[in-house]
Amino acid sequence: MSGQLEAARGHPHRAATLAWIAALFMAVHSLARIGLVVFDGDWAMLLPWRLPAVLGIGVVYDLAALAWVLPPFALLALACGPGRWGRRVHAVLASMALVLLVAALCFVAASEWVFWNEFGSRFNFIAVDYLVYTREVVGNIRESYSMGVLLGAVAAAALLLLAIVAAPFWRAARAPAGRIGSRLVWFVGLLALAVLSERAVGDGPRDAAGPASAGQLASNGWYEFFRAFRNNDLDFRAFYRVMPAERAEALLQQDRPTPAAADPQRTAASTMLPRLPLNVVMVSMESLGADYVESFGGRPGLTPRLDELARQGLMFTDLYATGLRTVRGLEALALSMPPTPGHAVPMRKRNKGLATVGGAFARMGYEPLFIYGGYAYFDNMRDFFGGNGYTVIDRTDIAPQNISHETVWGVADEDLFAQALREIDARAARGSRVYAHILTTSNHRPFTYPEGRIDIPSGSGRDGAVKYTDWAVGRFMAEAAKRPWFADTLFVFVADHTSNGRGRTDLPPANYRVPFFLYAPRHVAPGQVATMASQIDVGPTVLALLGAPPEPQFFGADILGHGREHPRAFMANYLTVGYMQDGLVVELTPRRGVRVLDAASGRLLPDGETSAAALIEQAIAHYQIATDRLRGAAAIAR
């Protein structure tokens, strides 16, 4: 009775706590979204027909995320009784939950800014992966940002928000409870709304925002994180467009050379290398897009040693990475396989016993090595490479006295290369041939390296890290040239991915273009090959130069042979996978979506599915069969 009198006198109902939570949640995410728009620096987002769309669609995703935040508060309101003690208990518990929520809101907003700075994206399954690798992730943040300032800003923002809402929220939390039936209805209704929001929202509103960057800004980090947690390895057949198996296999065969036709197709540029038992050393350079390498049309002055080596070697000037993360580059270079949706293969449970480039070398009598300056448990590298026949050498194999500098990601590149020389020397001394795949790390935030190596101070940004990696490569090659095995070694230089992310489209080709060249002064004459190709073609090209027969399980082509007749590239960005050919990019997306865009401008073809039907079929066939093979389901009945 007293509760009814208080309500009649204008006191708030306990359900008003839900209104405060909703207002707080929506306000923080709207401000965070505006902050990301400003931080991103794409002022086109401020145009009057674009910013309202971003903010309006953002409200949809914020509400979808809010739908999962409100039920716990509604459950508290339901569980705590209407009496004096029940009201006090509810006020205390609800206020404690409010403090936790405010702290989470501010912490996640700061985390989203850090993630956006690294990937140009809202949370996705990369963020889910990073929960596993807390040492590297937390260490990278600690080394890259001022933790005191960052945490201080989070605490200050949380205290400010609490100062604004604490008093009115406390009054609402101590208000009359209302009838238990109405409280039950509130709780059940909000729970049903949460379930509905998870099923009903999806990608539609985000796709309607316009450019890919607008869709990312419009989304909500909380929503995307939990969605990625559930959908980080999509079933291609369930979510993407497919075709009959026989048709897919027939299309794939059109993209493969016959062994008999391989040699006649090779041109003069591809017969420079005698079929000798050369050692092969592949250097995967971290985050080194073609836009940073002058000899590949990039910025001048940052890579003088790589430029000199490239000009003395055989340059492939139109090669594209398959993804935007190191693990995608490793997948392409090791497996010669398109980037199927979801996790890269090294991150999956079924990642062993596969056809690999290292395995092909092993059959030719080589010892495959994977040499990494960090801890190889990261991104499941040790499990993947070790489970597919490689000898894995990582940070644990490098003695402390051989380390001049390290970050959370690994030792400095000069220390990595020195270890690689020791490993190759030891095997050469006993007469073994090696295929050594070396992965660098210094061109990664926090961009630190030993002082005094170059004219850019350590930790000042990516330019310095690129120039330091170039210096380390030059030193490595100078030291290698002193070895007796150098003269009969083929060096392969290729980047794992670029430092760019999304652009105006999900798959802007310029953001995937990476340098690739071969260097063997006694065996490879200088030259340039302008054929468009993909990272998955690197392994088959090198193997073909050494006289190895084509590997039936590889999707890549010898760029100097069959690849010249059918130039194409594969690329992926999270759940969008693509196929580029003839100046067009076919994008395959979940919910069986297909888009065809002009590769140069990003313009969507209005009649894309009919004007590029053959390319669409090729794209579907490659990704469908790759997925089936990975799942051991090539013979699934359709």
Image (cartoon, grey):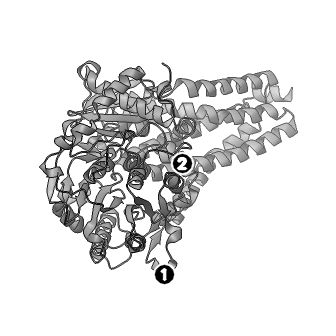
Give the side of residue 512 with respect to residue 272, left or right: right
Q: Are there few (<14), some (14-19), or many (20+) residues within 10 Å of tag 1?
A: few
The quadrant where residue 77 appears: top right
Q: Residue at x 61, y 48 (%)?
A: 104
Q: Secondary structure at mark 1?
A: helix
Q: Name the foreground residue: 57 vs 625.
A: 625
Give the side of residue 316 with respect to residue 498, left or right: left
Q: Which mark is residue 401?
A: 1
Q: Residue at x 40, y 67 (%)?
A: 432
**Dot 2 corresponds to which residue?**
129
Where does the image place residue 87, in percent across and percent down from the top left? 82, 38
Give the side of residue 481 with respect to residue 94, left or right: left
Q: Name the foreground residue: 13 vs 94.
A: 94
Where does the image place residue 10, in percent across and percent down from the top left? 72, 29
Q: Is residue 524 visible?
A: yes
Mark 2 touches mark 1? (CB < 8 Å): no
